[in-house]
Amino acid sequence: MPDAARPPRHVLILGGTTEARRLAATLAAEPALRVTSSLAGRVAAPRLPDGEVRIGGFGGPEGLARWLREHAVDALIDATHPFAGTISFSAAEAAATAHVPLLALRRPGWVPGPDDTWHQVATLEEAAAVLPTLGSRIFLTTGRMSLAHFSHLTDLWFLVRSVDAPEAPHPPRMEVLLDRGPFTLEDERELLRTHRIDVLVTKDSGAAATAPKLAAARECGIPVVVVRRPPTPTGIPEAATPADAAEWLRHRLFTEAGGR
């Protein structure tokens, strides 16, 4: 059990995802824990989680390891987006260097059903290469930072939905919807109908909040190009939900450590 005489255990969450915010809300309500969430700062007005918040990078794994030591972090949770790039590898290296326990909170990926028409690819470049064979009006949901990979497709029309306005380079024939989810199934049905979409492009980000677009595409018989997830560090314990992550953390900090 937690020791009331001991200062709260410090947990750093590498976040920005819905799961990270939910986990922060759960942990911040526990007096025995001090919670800091780290956001990359790529969104102009992010939804701030409960607890303390820092925004910006650490300067690679060395900088993160230094931050863990200087701020007496007792546990590190990697709850970043599945396509966040190198941050998961930096977290693994930093945790090992600073001798801080690490958990990866990874939402399960999507699985195609029998009525889905999916074209799974490994990279954004492969997604761009296959598009001309599938349709001409594309709903592109891979994020505003990915648009350069599709900028050479001058014969295709793109609908892009983003929280913040994208910057060049991007496809020349493009309409931008500035909006923030979650979106309902009816929202996605109407969007596909209104814009006469014939191909959906997405990353396998998982999570129920972004799944309605897949259901809408299935109903409309629209093919979906799905970019598979990049590799992640091996040997790191994983949790599929915020509740599972919170349980792992309590056990790791208060049961295995004997409450010290």
Image (cartoon, rainbow, N blue to C red):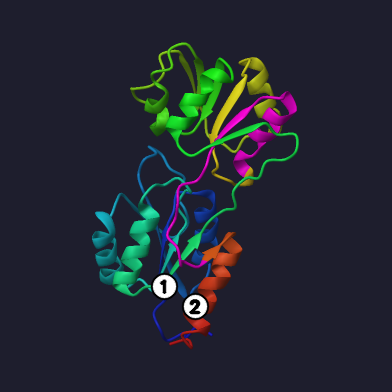
Horizontal and vertical percent for residue 151? 39, 20
Q: Name the kind of residue labelled 2 in the image.
A: Arg
Q: Which residue reaches farthest top?
A: 155
Horizontal and vertical percent for residue 26? 55, 63
Q: Secondary structure at mark 1?
A: loop
- Name the quarter where the N terminus is drawn: bottom right
Residue 251 placement: quadrant: bottom right
- Tell me if residue 240 can be seen: yes
Q: Nearer the viewer, residue 115 or 26?
A: 115
Q: Do the numbered discs 2 and 1 sit on residues whose CB atoms are within 8 Å? A: yes
Q: Secondary structure at mark 2?
A: helix
Residue labelled with disc 2: 252
Q: Is residue 107 magenta?
A: no
Residue labelled with disc 1: 101
- In the rendered structure, the answer to whether residue 1 lies left or right of residue 173 reads right
- In the rendered structure, the answer to whether residue 73 lies left or right of residue 242 reads left
Q: Is residue 225 magenta?
A: yes
- Tell me if residue 163 can be seen: no
Magenta stretch: give its range. 209-237
Horizontal and vertical percent for residue 45? 41, 39
Q: Nearer the viewer, residue 253 or 143?
A: 143
Horizontal and vertical percent for residue 176? 48, 21
- In the rendered structure, the answer to whether residue 67 lies left or right of residue 108 reads left
- The Cα–Cα distance between marks 2 and 1, rounded to whole angstroms, is 8 Å
Q: Residue at x 42, y 75 (%)?
A: 9
Q: Residue at x 62, y 45 (%)?
A: 110
Q: Name the kind of residue labelled 1 in the image.
A: Pro
Quick one: label 2, few (<14), some, or many (20+) residues within 10 Å? Answer: some
Q: Earlier in the sequence, mark 2 or mark 1?
A: 1
